[in-house]
Image (tube, rainbow, N blue to C red):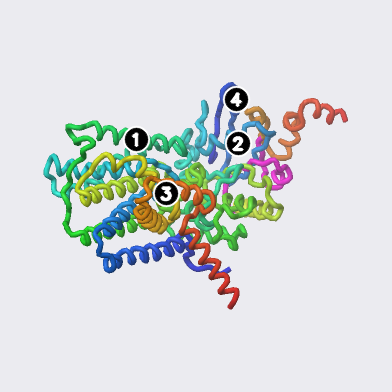
Amino acid sequence: MDYPRHPNFLRDKLAEEVRLSIAVLAVLALLPLGISSPYWLGVLIVSMYFAMLSCGWNLLAGYAGQFSLAPAAFAMLGGYTTGLLAYHLDAPLWIGLPLAAVVPGAIGLVLGRIVLRLSGPYLALTTLSFAEIARLVIYNSIDFTRGDQGLNVPGIVDDRTLYYYLFLAALCATVLIVYGVLRSPTGRFLQAIRDDEIGAASRGVDVVRCKTVAFLVSCAICGFAGGLYSTFARLVSPELGIIAQTGLVIAMVVIGGMGTLVGPLVGAMLVYVASEMLRDVGNIQMIVFALLVIVFARFFRAGLWGLARGLLARRRAAASGGA
Amino acid sequence: MALLRITGIQKRFGGLRAVDDAGMDVEEGELLGLIGPNGSGKTTLLNVLSGHLRPDAGQVLLDGRAVTGLNPTRLARLGIQRMFQMTRVFSRVSALDNLLVCGLAMGLDEARASERALQLLDELRLAASMHLDAGQLSGGQKKLLEFGACFMSPPRIALLDEPFAAVHPVMKEIMSAFIQRRNGEGQTFILVSHDMPVVVDLCPRAVCMNAGKVLADGPTQAVLNTPAVIEAYLGEDDSAEAGHG
């Protein structure tokens, strides 16, 4: 039989998603040309913050099958790393921001080792406990963190459009990092672990190392997103780490397409922009998203991206059938 | 020196002695049939050999080196590859990627792993399904895929747990022919199976276990004719009846 020399189906699927991710990022790059409202620019900036969290969480939950409930907590830890360094030590942001990735990454590495043998609800509960403990420690360490008053964090620039492009650059870097992990053998191993951990170990996959890498990268991405967001908001408070924020991240990933590269990007932008549009109707927005998550988890497990892919495949099949 | 030396392996689950002082030598290039009634301890012994269970006592030597209690990852990398009774494939990645994962994990570079995966898919007649997610394959195809995954990097020893169970005769034939071919090239196997005609056909030597113990070890036909083995399979009364009949 004749085969392509290096057939690589996973890479082909990934390449398709990369092209779409680039298209989404290109659209985001063009949006400020048509949007002058500082309010809507702010909404899009926060959407990109959530897109970074979604990409980070998706690497861990969607690709590695490690269902953590702490992405918002790691964003809060990143925000506090930047904030505390600036508040107590007057550390410049070029030190504070990289450390917003390093410190949560290191904490994630330790947490990853602790929860190594846990899966499913046990892993979810342990990471939820960690998230709540971290939030309560910050909330109650008033002398050090100023508790629920939060900390003032210096901004990077004053211009909102510049901030927009800073977030876009950070989001591009996030997508690139996730793509890099997925393209490496570790990315394949993570998906094998997600599907069958015992089977993966039996084939020689170093499960401990791969899970640790997934925790480290995911937590570092969330931490950096939190650090950058705190400079935009000029404030970091324990509110950043509440479980409702994690719920929003999960909704974004499930609706966009879990275990895909482009899904979390699309999901985060759509869900956050929609939540802003529904702001006037109050808390009903969370009910809407919760219902959507149930519908997607039950009927469209591949999310919006899976739906779009299915439609495209049907259209291609119809076109080739017609021709 | 035996390729694999198993001595005095014991494994208890509560009050049950699943493996009780089991021992055997497996020589390089041998195709050993491991037989016994259900619950005799065959799969538990394979679990000990592949690192999925830590024995309570006993020792496993691979090439003279103690490997007892090492984890499955290390044992796989040392060349002990295992096929499970309940199929274990990576259901949300393609058949091809299932094999690539195994090749990369065993240290092959991507080009070599691709080449090897294609050879195996062709040899196991799975090439037409290589782009399907493993979860979409039939039960028999999943078994073939997992079987192939053991050979992405030629193992020192392949432990096959019921590879022929609930498999279409054509696929059984593909696997049997593959095993014979590889064994002819010097590949060592331990084959657990209830399919006696296949065991007789493939394995020159067999070990029969019952209640965790090794009952008989020797040429396959001789083992099958051992009274204790007949009794283990048929039960005391039935074998007595058979004997008197």
Residue B67 relative to residue B137: left or right: left
Residue A51 relative to residue A152: left or right: right
Mark 4 crowdedness (10 Å alpha carbons): few <14, some 14-19, many ≥20: some
Q: Residue at x 33, y 40 (%)?
A: A242
Give the mark nearer the N terminus: 3 vs 1. Answer: 1
Residue at label 4? Answer: B17
Name the quadrant of the N terminus of chain A.
Answer: bottom right
Front disc: 3 or 1: 3
Residue B100 or residue A124, whichever sits in front: A124
Residue at the front extreme? A281
SS at badge 3: helix
First to last magenta residue range: B185-207
Name the quadrant of the C terminus of chain A.
Answer: bottom right
Q: Do marks 1 and 4 both belong to one polypeptide chain?
A: no
Give the mark nearer the N terminus: 2 vs 4. Answer: 4
Mark 3 crowdedness (10 Å alpha carbons): few <14, some 14-19, many ≥20: many
Front disc: 3 or 4: 3
Residue at label 1? Answer: A130
The residue type indicated by label 3 comes to Ala
Q: Label 2 vs label 1: CA separation? A: 39 Å
Q: Residue A22: where, in percent of width, then height?
A: 36, 65
Residue at label 2? Answer: B43
Residue at label 3? Answer: A251
The residue type indicated by label 4 comes to Arg
Q: Label 1 vs label 4: CA separation? A: 41 Å
Above or below — where is B154 with respect to B62? below
